[in-house]
């Protein structure tokens, strides 16, 4: 102990506890001469109080005292936090063996017999204090070493020292454990260590140690990452750090190092890398990686004068799958498409040479990891499949001999993906629209190439879907037109650009106009009249069909009710439901609300659903149709005969009417096949108690055919083209709601 003012040692404090005044006087005189600071207490209570206040270094205490005896005081001192380690010397009678036992039992450090040799006692007290301090230091050192060992074990950090002159190497316990060994059982040495390192990494590690050995100044630090491979265990990834200590001549004498197990960190980094580079749902490369690889492939093609190709796929009507079955089934579909696409694009879809003969034998993961070495000089030889986003997929063919090679791949993809897919008990058929772009002809960088292949894909979308097309410059005009339409369509409702035309539906027996079909029209302020064939698919794809469809239903019901209020004949109005509308869970609530808001009687509204919409989810369709039917509205299947309904399904649908598609009516008098189909549809409907409406009737001969087979209603230009609301009102007034079946006419264009 040292005084902070004069740096002289601070004397040890001794607390003397004795009820004998003479003993206290002698103790004070003798112990102060030996350099102690003496504290006195004549009973146990004062002893406990003085101990707490003064914190002595040692206690000399008589056993026999009034009140609390020495044993009681000793026990209470040991119960105090500050009294657990302080030496306590108990004074007993010379032959009082029983008191000695009790003293130890109470927690005394040692005992001394009376009478005292004060000079010897002073040396004994000094020894006991120093021994106690040394013991405490050792105890704290042991705790520190234990804590350090625990910390290294938790951190998976081992340390080592290499004394170069003696050749002695020290390894910590955790270093042994990292190497799969134990102290005393595993030989310490460089050879033992290197045997735990994979053979292909040893030369690099030896070179690192050589650099450390050749260092000429103290404090030089260096690090290296490598692996530890132990038999029967997973490979560990470790981070090695070392520091060199040199003598005055600059010779390395000691190298000390640490080795940290970073396997979990490495796995976490790999997972982050995987998330950054791969699509989590399908396991395919993602958009970012694909674009990087395309640019490398373009650069390579320009250097070598070769060709490559990019395929861009979009799944047709995928949103309908999500809306009908839910996103869970949609995700399963995307995973299945990814698998089929990968199988369709083979490693052999490239120019091969002997140096690439083993590429196809790489594991998929090794191959994909290899792809992400961003070395601009690296050759891109193997095809890459990626999920570009949503239901869009891309394929990179880095080397092709001719354009036909890319088309062959596109055909394989069409055949593979177009097969029916069983998803959790739901049989689904999905088709892709595929655009193809060749580089460097169709783009000298990734942005221009992807823009052009996207245009080719959308060209397929708008010319029938389920096919592929090679990019040509005129497709950019189509793509630009589509973006323009989508932009203006988003504001068509609020700018009051949408309107409805109504085409009459005529009863074949009486000639009475019994209904109209509401047909959507768009007259854009900027673009002029836009055909429904152009904008309806865009509305479907973008989701705009939902608000537009609600507007159509509401406007059609409002106008029909207005005709009734104007005293015109009561007729029904037919409204086409979109896929998205039919898939909505609250469709019947929307219909009910529209009828309530407009005041149209429920039996005056007919909802038309296409055949394919119903067959996407038969069970769900049956439930939806029954809920709608419960409202009292009429239900019709539009374009019947173009889908794949079976009679057993048709019987389950609570519908009122079948509408024969115009494609059959057009050639019903010239094509025996169309005539047979039309006749069969009418017969099936009648057997099921349904009525039939034929669309697209334009000739007297077609009308006669339909009359022959008792078709209930007809609709077409033979009677009237679609009319604006005011024009239809005029027609109803002038004809009193009846059309002549003998002199059927077309209204003025």
Image (cartoon, rainbow, N blue to C red):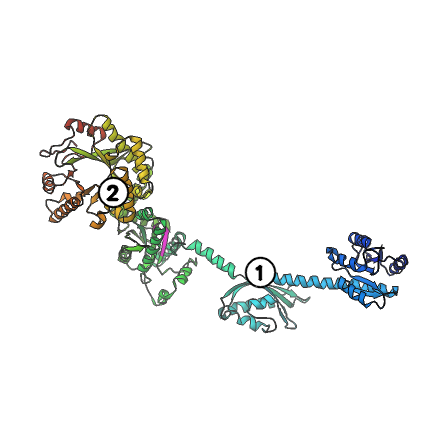
Foreground: 128 or 265? Answer: 128
> Which residue in the protein does label 1 denote?
155
Residue underneath mark 2: 609
**Which mark is in front, 2 or 1?**
2
Q: Is mark 1 on a helix, strand or loop?
A: helix
- Residues 728 and 360: in front is 728
Q: Position of residue 596 (x, y in %)?
A: 30, 32
Observer able to see residue 620: yes
Residue under the image location 26 percent in, 48 percent down: 615
Question: What percent of the width, then of the height, locates residue 273?
Answer: 46, 56
Residue 532: name its quadrant: top left
Position of the N terminus by quadrant: bottom right
**Which portion, as a residue range, is magenta?**
385-391
Magenta-drawn stretch contains 206: no
Q: SS of the residue at dot 2?
A: strand
The stretch drawn in magenta includes residue 386: yes
Q: Is residue 159 above or below residue 501?
A: below
Residue found at x 41% / y 52%: 288
Residue at x 49%, y 66% (from the top left corner): 235
Q: Earlier in the sequence, mark 2 or mark 1?
A: 1
Q: In this view, does 258 lie to the left or right of 103?
A: left
Q: Where is residue 434 in the image (x, y as percent from the top left)?
A: 29, 51
- Horizontal and vertical percent position of residue 94: 85, 67
């Amino acid at each position: 102990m040292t005084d902070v003012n004069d740096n002289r040692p601070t004397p040890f404090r001794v607390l003397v506890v004795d009820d004998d005044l003479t003993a206290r006087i002698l103790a004070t005189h003798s112990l102060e001469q030996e350099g102690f600071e003496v504290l006195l207490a004549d009973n146990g209570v004062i002893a406990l109080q003085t101990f707490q206040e003064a914190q002595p270094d040692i206690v000399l205490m008589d056993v026999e005292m009034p009140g609390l005896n020495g044993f009681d005081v000793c026990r209470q001192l040991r119960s105090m936090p500050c009294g657990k380690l302080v030496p306590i010397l108990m004074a007993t009678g010379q032959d009082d063996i029983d008191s000695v036992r009790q003293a130890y039992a109470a927690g005394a450090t040692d005992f001394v017999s009376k009478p005292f040799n004060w000079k010897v006692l002073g040396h004994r007290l000094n020894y006991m204090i120093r021994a106690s301090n040394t013991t405490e230091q050792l105890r704290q050192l042991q705790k520190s070493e234990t804590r350090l060992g625990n910390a290294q074990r938790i951190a998976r950090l081992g340390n080592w020292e290499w004394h170069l002159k003696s050749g002695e190497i020290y390894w910590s316990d955790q270093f042994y454990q990292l190497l799969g060994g134990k102290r005393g059982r595993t030989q310490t040495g460089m050879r033992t260590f290197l045997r735990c390192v994979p053979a292909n990494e040893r030369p690099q590690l030896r070179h690192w140690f050589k650099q450390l050995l050749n260092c000429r100044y103290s404090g030089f630090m260096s690090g290296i990452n490598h692996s530890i491979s132990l038999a029967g265990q997973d490979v560990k990834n470790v981070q090695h750090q070392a520091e060199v200590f040199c003598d005055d001549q600059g010779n390395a004498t000691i190298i000390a190092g640490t080795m940290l197990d970073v396997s979990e960190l490495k796995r976490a980094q790999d997972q982050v890398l995987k998330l950054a580079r791969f699509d989590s749902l399908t396991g395919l490369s993602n958009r970012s990686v694909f674009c990087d690889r395309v640019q490398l492939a373009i650069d390579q093609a320009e250097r070598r004068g070769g060709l490559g190709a990019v395929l861009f796929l979009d799944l047709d009507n995928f949103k309908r799958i999500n809306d009908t079955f839910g996103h869970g089934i949609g995700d399963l579909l995307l995973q299945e498409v990814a698998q089929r696409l990968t199988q369709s694009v083979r490693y052999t879809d490239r120019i091969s040479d002997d140096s690439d003969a083993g590429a196809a034998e790489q594991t998929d993961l090794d191959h994909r990891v290899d792809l992400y070495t961003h070395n601009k000089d690296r050759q891109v030889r193997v095809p890459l499949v990626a999920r570009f986003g949503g239901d869009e997929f891309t394929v990179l063919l880095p080397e092709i001999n001719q354009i036909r090679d890319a088309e062959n791949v596109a055909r394989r993809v069409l055949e593979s993906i177009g097969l029916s897919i069983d998803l959790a008990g739901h049989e689904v058929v999905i088709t892709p629209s595929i655009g193809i772009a060749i580089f460097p002809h169709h783009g000298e960088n990734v942005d221009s190439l992807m823009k052009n292949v996207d245009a080719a894909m959308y060209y397929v979308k708008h010319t029938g879907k389920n096919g592929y097309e090679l990019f040509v410059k005129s497709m950019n005009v189509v793509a630009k037109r589509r973006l323009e339409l989508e932009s203006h369509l988003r504001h068509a409702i609020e700018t009051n650009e949408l309107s409805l035309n109504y085409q009459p539906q005529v009863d074949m027996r009486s000639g009475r106009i019994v209904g109209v079909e509401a047909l959507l029209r768009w007259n854009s302020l900027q673009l002029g009249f836009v055909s429904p064939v152009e904008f309806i698919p865009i509305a479907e794809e973008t989701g705009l069909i939902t608000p537009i469809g609600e507007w159509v239903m509401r406007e059609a019901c409002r106008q029909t009710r207005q005709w009734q209020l104007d005293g015109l004949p009561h007729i029904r109005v037919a409204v086409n439901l979109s896929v998205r509308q039919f898939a909505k869970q609250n469709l019947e609530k929307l219909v009910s609300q529209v009828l309530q808001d407009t005041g149209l009687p429920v039996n005056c509204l007919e909802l038309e659903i296409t055949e394919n919409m119903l067959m996407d989810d038969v069970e769900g369709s049956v439930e939806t149709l029954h809920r709608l039917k419960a409202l009292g509205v009429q239900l019709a299947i539009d374009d019947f005969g173009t889908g794949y309904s079976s009679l057993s399904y048709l019987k389950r649908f609570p519908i009122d009417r079948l509408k024969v598609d115009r494609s059959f009516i057009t050639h019903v008098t010239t094509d025996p096949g169309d005539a047979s189909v039309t006749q069969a549809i009418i017969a099936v409907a009648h057997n099921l108690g349904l009525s039939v409406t034929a669309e697209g009737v334009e000739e007297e001969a077609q009308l006669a055919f339909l009359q022959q087979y008792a078709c209930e209603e007809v609709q077409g230009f033979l009677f009237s083209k679609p009319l604006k609301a005011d024009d239809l009102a005029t027609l109803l007034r002038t004809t009193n709601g009846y059309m002549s079946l003998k002199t059927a006419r077309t209204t003025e264009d």
